[in-house]
Image (cartoon, rainbow, N blue to C red):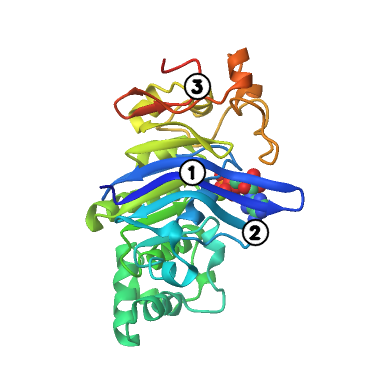
Amino acid sequence: MSLLEIKNLKTYFETKDGVVKAVDDVSFTLEEGEAIGLVGESGCGKTTTALSIINLLPQEGRVVGGEINYNGKNLAELDQNKIRRYRWNDISIAFQGAMNALNPVKKIGEQITEVMMYHNGLDYKSARKKAKELLELVEIDSARIDQYPHEFSGGMKQRVMIAMALACDPKVLIGDEPTTALDVMVQAQILELLEKLRKELGMSVILITHDLSVMAETCDKAAVMYAGKIVETGSVENIINNSSHPYTQKLVKAFPDIHGKKEMTESIPGTPPDLITPPSGCYFHPRCEHATEECRVSAPPLRKMAENHYVACHLKGV
Ligand SMILES: Nc1ncnc2c1ncn2[C@@H]1O[C@H](COP(=O)(O)OP(=O)(O)OP(=O)(O)O)[C@@H](O)[C@H]1O
Ligand SMILES: [Mg+2]
């Protein structure tokens, strides 16, 4: 049994213009100590997938189908009260744009201790002691515990957010673009930190990024999302060196030097589809130079190409 199994997850948003199918039949598993990358262009449903896992969706969003099995328990069936117990303690998120999510008028130590006191029932003294340990763990001098967010650089604030996400010893840490907006050096340091935490704490990681090079450096496996669906999934090795879906191939090409350059050098022509009225057949067909009549009329299922490699493309895996 996997630590976390996302099975046929569907999350939709009700909007005045119609229903946005932000996550549409997404499945993946995560083992203990494993890191998976969720990659894809802006708007493909990465954050929505993460928020669905511990039901932190905005009011207009709803999980309408599928299972989220954590340690054998289906979290999708739990009401807000019951799922609250799993947040922070089992599955914790360092949010997208988290650097700016710290409360500017509260000392960082206070913000971290509050999480432990509220969610773990720790008394102030023990929480403060642990907050200091966590700061050291993310390589911030614990003497800075009584400083305010503005006294820290962007990368340091990101470390504080990671320390906070670790406050209740989660089994799964979700990092939503944890290094975006940081410069390349700081980005590398944060990624190394995540690696260290994964090894030392035996944590599992879901790393959300639009940057394939970040995924390649940090993860064991990856799921490539396009318009709310997984189009290719497998080991990082297969995704990078053996990519089979035309979309993944374009993504890989957009990051020519996976281990060096961090910037996307070539953008993929065209734009992702509208998720209220997506195209017929394969959602990628309007942007795909290989598209055939079959691609226009029928949606390709994910098919096994090899061990640790699945692709949803009519032209592959048959
Ligand atoms: N509150 C909302 N109401 C309506 N639609 C939403 C809402 N939040 C997200 N969406 C839509 O759901 C889809 C998936 O969005 P999501 O934020 O999950 O994408 P993402 O992959 O995280 O993108 P990014 O890389 O920009 O963070 C998008 O089409 C988005 O417009
Ligand atoms: Mg996002």
Residue 277 visible to the viewer: yes
Q: Residues within 10 Å of mark 1 (few under 14, many from 20)?
A: many
Residue 74 in percent (x, y) is at: 38, 56
Residue 291 visible to the viewer: no
Q: CA distance from mark 3 to mark 2?
A: 32 Å
Q: Which residue is mark 1?
A: 209
Residue 62 in percent (x, y) is at: 57, 56
Whether label 2 lies within 8 Å of ligand 1 gets the answer yes
Q: Secondary structure at mark 2?
A: loop
Q: Which mark is residue 60?
A: 2
Q: Residues within 10 Å of mark 3 (few under 14, many from 20)?
A: many
Q: Earlier in the sequence, mark 3 or mark 1?
A: 1
Name the amino acid, label 3: Cys
Q: CA distance from mark 1 to mark 2?
A: 24 Å
Label 3 with label 1: CB-CB less than 8 Å: no
Name the amino acid, label 2: Glu
Residue at image coords 39%, 76%: 119
Name the amino acid, label 1: Thr
Label 3 with label 2: CB-CB less than 8 Å: no
Q: Secondary structure at mark 1?
A: strand
Q: Which residue is mark 3?
A: 313
